[in-house]
Image (cartoon, helix red, strand yellow):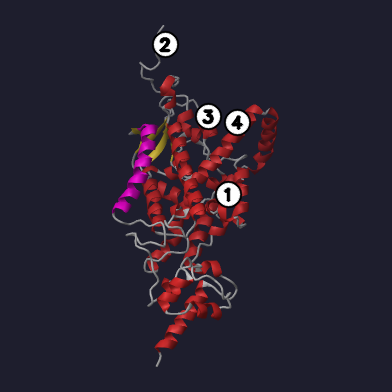
Amino acid sequence: MRINPIVYGVLVLVAFFGIILGFQSAGIWSTSGKVTTSGEAVQPSAADVNTIKGWMTLQQVSETFSAPVAEILSQFSLPADTPPSTAIKDLETDLFSLTNLRIWLQERMQATTQP
Amino acid sequence: MNTNTNSVPPTSGSIKPRLHGWRAWLRHGILRRITQLAFAWYITFLIVQHAVVGENGATVTASAEAFCPFGGLETLYRYITGDGTFVAHTHLSNLVLLITVLGVALLLRSAFCGWICPLGFLQDLVANLRKVLTRRIPGLRRGLTRINQSGHRLAFLDRYLRYVKYVVLVWAVAGSAYYGYMVFRDYDPWATLLNVAEFSFTPGVIVLGVTLLASFFVERPWCRYACPLGAVSGLFGKLSPVYLKREESACTSCAICTKACPMGLDVHTSTTVRSADCITCLECVEVCPRSGALEVKIGLPLIGK
């Protein structure tokens, strides 16, 4: 069966957008790690250091894990006047990285819970 | 004398009637270019919006990387095995777009490549620029003809270089699965374009430069030789019921279709075009001068009848 090339082009667009809209209607769509599929802001969880993301701020991490900002800055030799609103990923150095922060917070939590 | 060429339907093999007025604009080639331009503009808007608003504005703006279908393939292993988490720079949208592109490929062949992909469109623009310049600058035309003639000895490489994109595909997907980050990202010319506002020099800048320069001499070089998304889309497209059929009784073997094919396929010597490299841009159908000689058909997958 022959297809008219213009009809083919229209079918391409219908299929492309149709599939995407189908997923969006089912709530399966998110273009940012900062919000959930229902639009709520993603927050770190005190129970799991792996929920910390690079775009999260020192303030968010400090409040969630009860670790004073000054202690974090001191631990990783970061400037003491660093604003708490600074994102983790904007502070990465040889000593400080998201991975190192997670490891340190994990150890700190274990030390705090041990009798 | 009857000058109304639209009242008598063309018979198979007859020269296609020349269209006039608004009908001349009602060609699928125009629709394809409008579609490509629209997607390219949307991606440009996302790039500018994300660069201007940044990531700490009142509104969460999506990075254009969230709209890359290949990111979905790179994060698929992590998503399946890692409790629904993603590798950095990818989101649920990448997975949805991957499924969409492969779904379209299963239904309608690699139409994403020929009708939507902005990187493909960019290469098309460079190729069209060459065509315009060679028409206006005879010296350039002569120079490029000489380069083409001396490059004929290397034409045999084309057949083998087309397999490189499958190597890139395996490396990118397996690397992401093994290392947990996108190993291909720093070499990806598309990621380089999306992050142009960051002004960071990665190998992708060189790859992008080479791709655009090569587009002046060979149409769609990235798509032919290196695109991993095109590689997987082409494989899925082999299962599509859509194919191109050349009717030998109507065809005069003028080879205009082969010259027009941006992927360098030998259309005029094939009975059916089911190559994984076919991006169904339908340029061949548009330029074919004979009615019924080259048509888009639906048939049984793989068999083509």
Mark 4, chain letter?
Answer: B
Q: x, y (%) of residue B247?
A: 42, 30
Mark 1, chain letter?
Answer: B
Q: Of label 3 and label 1, which has the lower sequence position?
A: 1
Mark 1 residue element: helix
Q: Of label 1 and label 2, which has the lower sequence position?
A: 2
Image quarter of the N terminus of chain B:
top left
Mark 2, chain letter?
Answer: B
Same subunit, labels 3 and 1: the answer reads: yes
Point out the stretch of residues depicted in magenta.
A3-25
- Identify the amino acid type marked 2: Thr
Q: Which residue is mark 2?
A: B3
Foreground label between 1 and 4: 4
Tag shown at residue B161? 1
Q: Of label 4 and label 3, which has the lower sequence position?
A: 4
Same subunit, labels 3 and 2: the answer reads: yes
Quote the CA–CA distance across marks 3 and 1. Answer: 24 Å
Mark 4 residue element: helix
The residue at the point 43 percent across, 83 percent down is A109
Q: x, y (%) of residue B73?
A: 44, 58
Q: Which residue is mark 4?
A: B132
Tag shown at residue B251? none
Q: Which residue is mark 3?
A: B256
Q: Of label 4 and label 2, which has the lower sequence position?
A: 2
- Identify the amino acid type marked 4: Val
Same subunit, labels 1 and 4: the answer reads: yes
Mark 3 residue element: helix
Mark 2 residue element: loop
